[in-house]
Amino acid sequence: MGSARGGRHGAEWAAEAAGTAILVFGGLSAATLDFGRASPVASAIPSHSLRLLLTGVLFASTGALVTISPLGRRSGAHLNPAVTFGFWLGGHVHRHDLAGY
């Protein structure tokens, strides 16, 4: 995670962008797989509620894997602007880093 000291942290910002892209790709892939047209998952699991649960588990697992990956360790794995804002309020992120994260 970027420190509270000033400066720019391009490598951390790039790792954050890559981690967020992986999270979005994983989440959208899970939703498409579970609810897309001619989905094999829809045939195997006819319950809409169960497929929603599966989608949530897959999305959360993707986020957890990004967090513990080298990308997440490098960037701090905020993956959400609200988390970055909270870190800023707590003094863990410098205001110069807010836009990057």
Image (cartoon, rainbow, N blue to C red):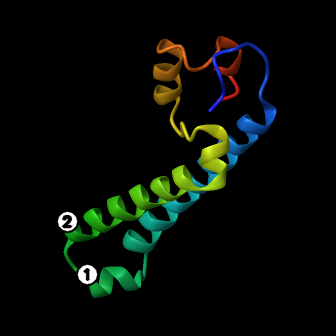
Q: Residue at x 72, y 35 (%)?
A: 13
Closest to the observer, 5 or 51: 5
Left/right placement of residue 14 relative to residue 58 reads: right
23 shown above or below 90: below
Q: Is residue 53 left or right of residue 15?
A: left
> 99 and 2: which one is in front?
2
Of the pair 97 and 91, the residue shown nearer to us? 91
Q: Could you tell me which secondary element the residue under label 1 belongs to? A: loop
Position of residue 36 relative to residue 84, above or below, is below
User: In the rendered view, would you say 81 is above or below 24?
Assistant: above
Q: Dot 2 lies on which element?
A: helix
Query: Where in the figure is residue 78, as x and y percent of width and height?
Result: 54, 36
Mark 1 Cα within 10 Å, few/some/many (few <14, many 20+)?
some
Identify the image quadrant of the N terminus.
top right
Q: Position of residue 50 (x, y in %)?
A: 22, 70
Along the viewing direction, whichever of 12 and 3 lies nearer the viewer:
3
Work out whether 36 lies above or below 95. Answer: below
The residue beneath circle 1 is 45
Looking at the rendered structure, which numbered label has been put on residue 18? none
For marks 2 and 1, give the CA distance.
Answer: 10 Å
Residue at 33% x, 59% y is: 56
Residue located at (43% from left, 76% from top): 37
| Label total for image | 2
The x and y percentages for residue 73 are: 61, 46
Identify residue for label 2.
49
> Three-letter amino acid code at disc 2?
Ser
- Quadrant (top left/top right/bottom left/bottom right) for the C terminus: top right
Residue 17 is situated, as x and y percent measured from the top left of the image, at 68, 42
Q: Inspect the image, locate mark 1, and give the three-letter code of the amino acid beneath it.
A: Ile
Which residue does the image show at 51% across and 59% down from the upper left? Answer: 65
